[in-house]
Amino acid sequence: MKVYISKILGFLLSLFFYHCQAYPHYKFVVKEVPYTRLCNTKNILTVNGQYPGPTLYVHKGDTIAVDVYNRGKYNITIHWHGVKQPRNPWTDGAAYITQCPIAPGAKFRQKIILTTEEGTLWWHAHSDWLRATVYGAMIIYPKLGTSYPFAKPDAEIPILLGDWWIQDIVEVVDELFLSGGEGNYSNAFTINGQPGDLYPCSKQDTFRLKVEKGLTYLLRIINSAVQDMLFFSIAGHNVTLVGSDASYLKPLERSFFVISPGQTFDVLLEANQSPNHYYMAAKAYTVAAKGVFDNTTTTAIVEYSGNYTPSSPPLFPYLPEYNDSHAAVNFTGSLRSLADEEHPINVPMEINSHLFYTLSMNTVLCPNNSCSGPNGTRILASVNNISLVDPKIDILEAYYYCIPGVFGTWFPDFPPLFYNFTAEDLPMNLEIPTLATEVKILEYNSTVELVFQGTNLLLGSDHPMHLHGFSFYVVGVGVGDFDNEIDPLKYNLVDPPLSNTIIVPVDGWLAIRFKADNPGVWFMHCHFDRHMVWGMDAVFIVKNGESPDTKMSIPPSDMPLCRKPVPITSKCLSFSIKSSIRRSVCSTL
Ligand SMILES: *[C@@H]1O[C@H](CO)[C@@H](O)[C@H](O)[C@H]1NC(C)=O
Ligand SMILES: *[C@@H]1O[C@H](CO)[C@@H](O)[C@H](O)[C@H]1NC(C)=O
Ligand SMILES: *[C@@H]1O[C@H](CO)[C@@H](O)[C@H](O)[C@H]1NC(C)=O
Ligand SMILES: *[C@@H]1O[C@H](CO)[C@@H](O)[C@H](O)[C@H]1NC(C)=O
Ligand SMILES: *[C@@H]1O[C@H](CO)[C@@H](O)[C@H](O)[C@H]1NC(C)=O
Ligand SMILES: *[C@@H]1O[C@H](CO)[C@@H](O)[C@H](O)[C@H]1NC(C)=O
Ligand SMILES: *[C@@H]1O[C@H](CO)[C@@H](O)[C@H](O)[C@H]1NC(C)=O
Ligand SMILES: *[C@@H]1O[C@H](CO)[C@@H](O)[C@H](O)[C@H]1NC(C)=O
Ligand SMILES: *[C@@H]1O[C@H](CO)[C@@H](O)[C@H](O)[C@H]1NC(C)=O
Ligand SMILES: *[C@@H]1O[C@H](CO)[C@@H](O)[C@H](O)[C@H]1NC(C)=O
Ligand SMILES: *[C@@H]1O[C@H](CO)[C@@H](O)[C@H](O)[C@H]1NC(C)=O
Ligand SMILES: [Cu+2]
C-alpha cells in the first residue's frame, strides 16, 4: 500500500514538475516607483522597482517563462527584443499586433524561446512609449561546455544606453498626438540609468567601470533610448566589436561607433593604457533634426585601479559631429559576420519574394491648419505610403480566430509611385499617406529580399528598422536611390552581418534577406518610437507549413485577448470572405 501511494505521489509530483518546472520562471512586477534624476523626482514605471530593469541571464537554446504582473496604471506589453520565438508569436509582446495589452491588475505568463541567439539582447515595454523606463538586458551565454569565439574576457559588463525625460512619458506622447507636431525631446542620455558628470545633480551617481591594467572587458552595449541613435566612444581606447544583435561579428576595431535604438553590440575593451580616469561618452547622431534635438552628452568613467593621480577632469573621447552621416553609414557598411566553421551563415541565394519598401515622413491636413506640423499639418510616417493604423483587435487574434474586418492583406510589394526618392524639394502632394491596417502575407519557408529606400519627403532621416520573429542578413547599403541593376551586383553574400535592427541611412537604401520559416504574425517598424507611433510600420503574416512542427503553437491560456475567443472550428469557413488570399489565410489554420 505504502509503495502504491508513493508511486501515485511520484507520478503527481512529476506531473507538477512537468507543468510548473519544465523551464525557469521569473517574476516581473510592473509598478511605479519614484526616481530622482536631473534634480527632479518623479514616478516612473519600472519592473520590480528597478531602473534599468533586471537583467535576464540565459544560455543559448534555453526556454524561460516570465510572469508579468501589471501593477501600474497603464495598459502595457513586454517584448523580448531579438528573440525569434519560433512558432510562438503569442508572447512576442507587440501591442495590437500580437496581443492586447495587459490591463492594470492583470497578469500574463510569457514564454521566451531561444534558439540560435547568442550574445546580448534586451527586453522592453512595447506599448506607447512606456519602454522609456521599462527595459533591461538579456545576456545569452554560449551553451554549457562551449565558449566564445574569442579569448574569455576577464569580466562582462552590461552598458545600457538610455534617455531621461523630465516630463512624464505618457504626457509627452499625449502632447505629441494632440499637437500633431514633432513633440518634445529627452532631457538627458544615460549610461546604466545615470546621466553622468555633465548634467546637473548627477555627478555623485555617475556610473564607474573599475578596470585593472592588462585585463580585457566584454561590454554588452544596448541602445534603449526612445528616440536617438548615439555615437559612443571611450577616451584613449579603441574597442573591438565582436558581436551584434546576439550574433558574432568579425572583430572590428574602432575608436567610436554609432548604435541605434534597438541595436546591441558586444565589444572588447582592453585596459591597456596608462592608469588614469577615462570618460566613456555617448551623444546623439541625427541629421533630420536640423539642429533641434537633445544635444547633451552622457558619460561614465573607466577607472583604472592602482596608485596614481587621475587627470581632472577625466580624459574626454572624440565623438563625431552630431550630423556626421558619413561616419554612420561607413560604420554600418563595415560590419561583417564572423562566418567561420563553427558559426556558418546561411544567406538565401534564390529569392521567392522581392520587396521594395519606401520609408517616408508624411503630413496630413488638419482642420483650419491647426496642428503643429509644417504649415499647420499633422506629421505622420509610412512604409510604401501606408501609415499603419493600430486595429482595435490585435492582428494575431484576428488572424487566428478569423475575425473579419480587422486587417486587409494588400500591403504592396512596391511603393505606389516611383520618383526620385532622395531629390530635394519633392512636391508636397506626395507627402500625404494612406492610413490603413494592411499586412503582407508570406508563404511558409519562402525566401525574402527586402530593400528599404529612405525618401526625402518632408525631410530625410535615418531609420533603424527592426523586424520581430527573425534575424536578417544585411546584404547591401548605400546612399541615394537604389539602383536595381547595379547595386545587387555589389551585395555581400559571403559574410553579411546577421541583425534584428539596422540603420537605413538618411536618403539612402539598405537590403536585407531572410527565410520566412517562422509561422506567425510579426511586426516590423522603425525603432524610433516617434516614427513607430506615426505609422512607419509593417506587419508580416507568415503562413503555417504543412507539418505540425511548422505551424503556429496554440495560444497560452492566459492570453490577453481584445475580445472573447470564438470557437475556431467551422466559423472560419462560414465568414463571407472577400479575397482568395483571405480564404487561404483562414484555411491554413
Ligand atoms: C487598454 O486596453 C483595452 C483593450 O484593448 C482598451 O479597451 C482600453 O481602451 C485601453 N486603455 C487605454 C487607456 O488605452
Ligand atoms: C517639454 O518638456 C519641458 C521639460 O523638458 C517642459 O517644460 C515643457 O512643458 C514640455 N512641453 C512642451 C510642449 O514643450
Ligand atoms: C585606434 O584605431 C585607429 C584605426 O581605427 C588607429 O588609427 C589608432 O591608432 C588606434 N588607437 C589606439 C589607441 O589603438
Ligand atoms: C550642441 O552643444 C554644443 C555645446 O554643448 C554646442 O557647441 C553645439 O553648437 C550644439 N550643437 C547644436 C547643433 O545645437
Ligand atoms: C552639420 O551641421 C553643420 C551645422 O550645424 C553644418 O555646417 C554641416 O554642413 C553639417 N554637416 C553635414 C554632413 O550635413
Ligand atoms: C569607411 O571609411 C574608410 C576610410 O575612409 C574606407 O577605407 C572604407 O572603405 C569605408 N567603408 C565603407 C563601408 O564605407
Ligand atoms: C475653422 O475656423 C472657422 C473660422 O475661424 C471656424 O468657424 C470653424 O469652427 C473652425 N473649424 C474647426 C474645425 O476648428
Ligand atoms: C509650407 O507651405 C509653403 C508655402 O505653400 C511651402 O513653400 C512649403 O514647402 C511648405 N512646407 C512644407 C513642409 O510642406
Ligand atoms: C535625384 O535627386 C538627387 C538629389 O537631388 C540628384 O542628385 C539625382 O541626380 C536625381 N536623380 C535623378 C535620376 O533625377
Ligand atoms: C500616397 O497616397 C496618397 C493617397 O492615395 C497620394 O495622394 C500620394 O501622392 C501618395 N504618395 C506617394 C509618395 O506615393
Ligand atoms: C524549409 O526549408 C528548409 C531548408 O532551409 C528545409 O530543410 C525544409 O524541409 C523546408 N520545409 C518545408 C516544410 O518546406
Ligand atoms: Cu524612422
Image (cartoon, rainbow, N blue to C red):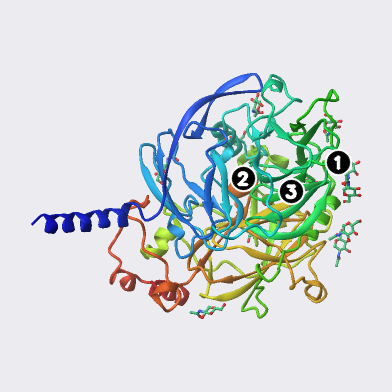
For the residue marked with disc 2, what is the amino acid? Asp
Look at the numbered disc 2 and give the secondary structure of its residue: helix
Could you classify mark 1 by the number of other residues whose Cα lies within 10 Å: few (under 14), some (14-19), or many (20 or more)? Answer: few
For the image, the number of numbered tags is 3
Quarter-of-image position of residue 144: bottom right
Q: Residue at x 40, y 61 (%)?
A: 398
Q: Position of residue 358 (x, y in %)?
A: 69, 62
Could you classify mark 3 by the number of other residues whose Cα lies within 10 Å: few (under 14), some (14-19), or many (20 or more)? Answer: many
For the residue marked with disc 3, what is the amino acid? Leu
Q: Is residue 365 visible?
A: no
Q: Mark 1 points at which residue?
A: 321
Q: Is mark 1 within 8 Å of ligand 5?
A: yes
**Height in image: 99 above or below 485?**
above
Left or right, residue 46 beside residue 5:
right
The numbered mark at residue 268 is 3
Calculate the distance from the C-alpha at mark 1 to the C-alpha at mark 2: 23 Å
Question: Nearer the N terminus, badge 1 or badge 3?
Answer: 3
Q: Position of residue 576 (x, y in %)?
A: 36, 71
Left or right, residue 249 beside residue 72:
right
Q: Mark 2 points at which residue?
A: 529
> Is residue 367 or residue 7 the one in the foreground?
7
Q: Which residue is drawn at 50% across and 34% down?
A: 46
The numbered mark at residue 539 is none
Quarter-of-image position of residue 304: top right
